[in-house]
Image (cartoon, grey):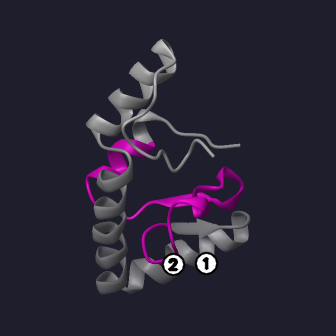
Amino acid sequence: KYYSSNRIATLIANGIPTLIDEKIKYSDFFSNNELIFYKNICDLIDKVNFYKKNERKRIQIGFNGKLKYLKIFNNKIISDYIIHKTLGTKPSYNYVWDK
């Protein structure tokens, strides 16, 4: 259902406005003010052209995405998830992706 990579994590966590396919379902975690979602290649091209011309919106989305990403995917939460899944113990956090 979800997909991530080091590249996606690096882009979002560094405040770079990130365009991501709707099929990845990151809309379960992020709003349109935090990531730029596209439906298909034509939509992607339209959004690249739009945000190329709208620097303020582009920067704001990158900033908002970074804040949200670091809130829900920070190192403490990810480490907690790995430890508690491995040991089968009760988690310390509510993981937004583990529903």
Q: CA distance from mark 1 to mark 2?
A: 5 Å
Relative side of 39 to 15, left or right = right
Image: 33 above or below 21? below
Q: Residues within 10 Å of mark 1 (few under 14, many from 20)?
A: few
Image: 97 above or below 60? above
Image quadrant where one finds the N terminus = top right
Residue 19 percent coordinates (x, y): 51, 62
Image: 15 above or below 42? above
- The verdict on residue 3 being magenta is no
Look at mark 2 in the image and give the residue it sits on. Answer: 49
Occupied quadrant, residue 18: bottom left
- Kindly identify the amino acid type of the residue bearing the numbered disc 1: Asp
Residue 38 percent coordinates (x, y): 64, 67
The reply to whether callout 1 and callout 2 are in contact (CB within 8 Å) is yes
- Kindly identify the amino acid type of the residue bearing the numbered disc 2: Asn
Q: Which residues are magenta?
A: 8-35
- Taking the spot 30% from the left edge, 60% from the top edge, the residue there is 66
Look at mark 1 in the image and give the residue it sits on. Answer: 46
